[in-house]
Image: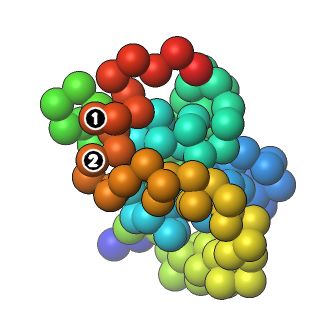
Amino acid sequence: MSIQIEPISLFKSLSDNIRLSILLLLQAEEELCVCEFSEALDEIQPKISRNLALLKKVGLVVNRRQGQWIYYSINKQLPQWATQVLLETYSGNREHIATPLAKLNKIGANKDRPMILCKGSSK
């Protein structure tokens, strides 16, 4: 079963650099917390959280809580056309997130990063 999403909502989401980067990072990493986005994109957490909230409201991302962290991922119930748009955007634009991914990989494995980044985050 897929959710309803308006094409204009998807494309408006992709037209913002931070939201586009968030979606591309999620395509690459599957799941990330706010601290990881903040570090990778060199943006303050409130700005990242605001953009994640917009993506969640549209239905593009979902979140889950694990302990003190909230992890975000692309909504698996997106319609096929929306999933395809995101996959094609990622496939053709990996260079857009090459530096942010390199920053994350330098810190450590996906499962370890929130413990490293979120403890004393001052961003």
Q: How is the image coloured?
A: rainbow
- Name the residue carrying label 2: 112
| Secondary element at image label 2 | loop
What kind of residue is marked 1?
Met
In the picture, measured across the screen, residue 81 lies left or right of residue 66, that is right
Is 33 situated above or below 13? above
Farthest left residue?
A: 67
Image quadrant where one finds the N terminus: bottom left
Local packing at callout 1 (Cα closer than 10 Å; few below 14, some 14-19, many 20+) is few
49 or 107: nearer the eye? 107
* Other-residue count near label 2 (Cα within 10 Å), few / some / many at <14 / 14–19 / ≥20: few
Tell me what residue is drawn at x 37 percent, y 53 percent.
108
The location of residue 123, given as percent across then percent down, is: 58, 20
Q: Are marks 2 and 1 in contact (CB under 8 Å)?
A: yes
Q: Residue at x 51, y 69 (%)?
A: 27
How far separated are the C-alphas under marks 2 and 1?
6 Å
Rendered image quadrant of residue 96: bottom right
Residue 60 seen in the figure: no
Image quarter of residue 115 = top left
Amino acid under label 2?
Asp
Residue drawn at x 67%, y 32% as measured from the top left? 43
Element marked by disc 1 = helix
Q: Which label number is shown at residue 115?
A: 1
Whether residue 94 is visible, yes or no, is yes
Question: Percent position (x, y) of residue 19?
Answer: 68, 48
Residue 88: x percent and y percent?
A: 67, 83
